[in-house]
Amino acid sequence: MADTPESKPSSIGSAAPQMQGGLIGAEIAAGIATLVWLAISGVLVLRGEFDVAGRTQAAAVAVLIVVPIGLAWVLAAAARTRRQVRSEITELRRGVEALRKAYVTQAQQDNSGTAQLIARRLDELVAGQRKAETSLAMLGSIRMAEMEAAAPTPKAVAQAPVDTTQPTLALGTPAEALEPPLSNEDFIRALNFPETAEDQEGFSALRRALKHRSSEQLIRASQDILTLLSQEGIYMDDLRPDLARPEIWRKFAKGERGRAVAPLGGIRDRSSLALTAGRMKTDPVFRDAAHHFLRKFDQTFSPFEEGASDSDLSGFANTRTARAFMLIGRVAGTFD
């Protein structure tokens, strides 16, 4: 009948009790040396070799007899301890080997759990790849929009009438004055950047926004700060801020700061806040880009708010640029 776990003695340390029941070679040798030395000392005392008339001489003789015997037994005890330690080390090695085999066996039995872990890890990698692709499409959108705007289609070139006259503009008139006003819808869509490389509506809105100096400066400042944040693994699509009411945004546009507009700092993700604050303190390039972004945001948002409806402000608050403002503004103390 097999032993139960309760009745089976532990193998570790079991050798020590077994050795304590018998004598080892060093103890036998110490016993023999003790008897021999006592015999020699007795013979010398009986023959009068030691003068033990005085107390001091008697104590010296006693020490001379006892010390060698004590040394012999100390050596014997050391030999026993050394043997016990070796035995325990051997038992420990056997125990570790048994644990290792049990771990391997358990791991082989848990193949299904390992497969689930691997599957979950693969899902995380796929999600990360999709996020990276979205981020690359967003961060490269300005360059793609500029290239598309600079290269007219052959059909447009063929249909363009030949004008031999020179256009006349008033002195100092900016080129953007000839462009139609940027709609709130295009402004909001441009600040969110194209979702993917196939987002034609997003690219069209971005091209139109880049033709206006104020929105173009904010878009470029936003792209710079989003690029720097992505280096820390911070993506606006991962943030789920608490959105403030439109009237709070209007207060900010009117110049109010601090507690009055604190709900605008709706980013609660501690990891993103900590990483951004650390980068702000240690990286002067990041710090300059952050402050430049906040200035351009302030300068551009105020004119936009004047003609924006509450629905426009709600859509604006959901853009990637607005989320970056919430994060950077909270770290910079805009809402304190």
Image (spheres, rainbow, N blue to C red):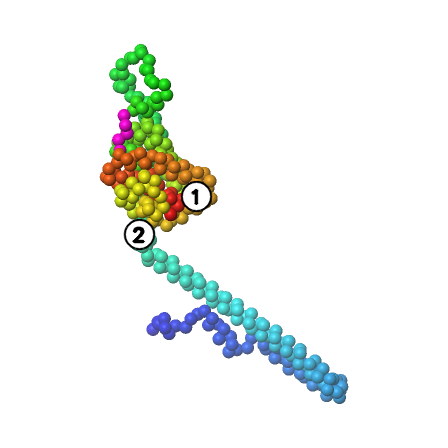
Q: Which residue range is magenta in the image?
A: 180-184
Q: Earlier in the sequence, mark 1 or mark 2?
A: 2
**Left or right of residue 270, residue 49 in this image:** right
Location of residue 313 by image quarter: top left
Q: Residue at x 47, y 67 (%)?
A: 91
Q: Nearer the viewer, residue 127 or 283?
A: 283
Pointer 2: residues within 10 angstroms few (<14), some, or many (20+)?
few
Give the labeled residue for mark 1: 280
Query: Within the magenta stretch, is there residue 336?
Result: no
Type of amino acid at the residue the image marks with label 2? Gln
The quarter of the picture where the N terminus appears is: bottom left
Give the labeled residue for mark 2: 116
Q: Is residue 251 visible?
A: yes
Residue 145: give its label: none
Q: Position of residue 285 (x, y in %)?
A: 45, 38
Query: Within the magenta stretch, is there residue 181?
Result: yes
Q: Residue at x 56, y 75 (%)?
A: 24
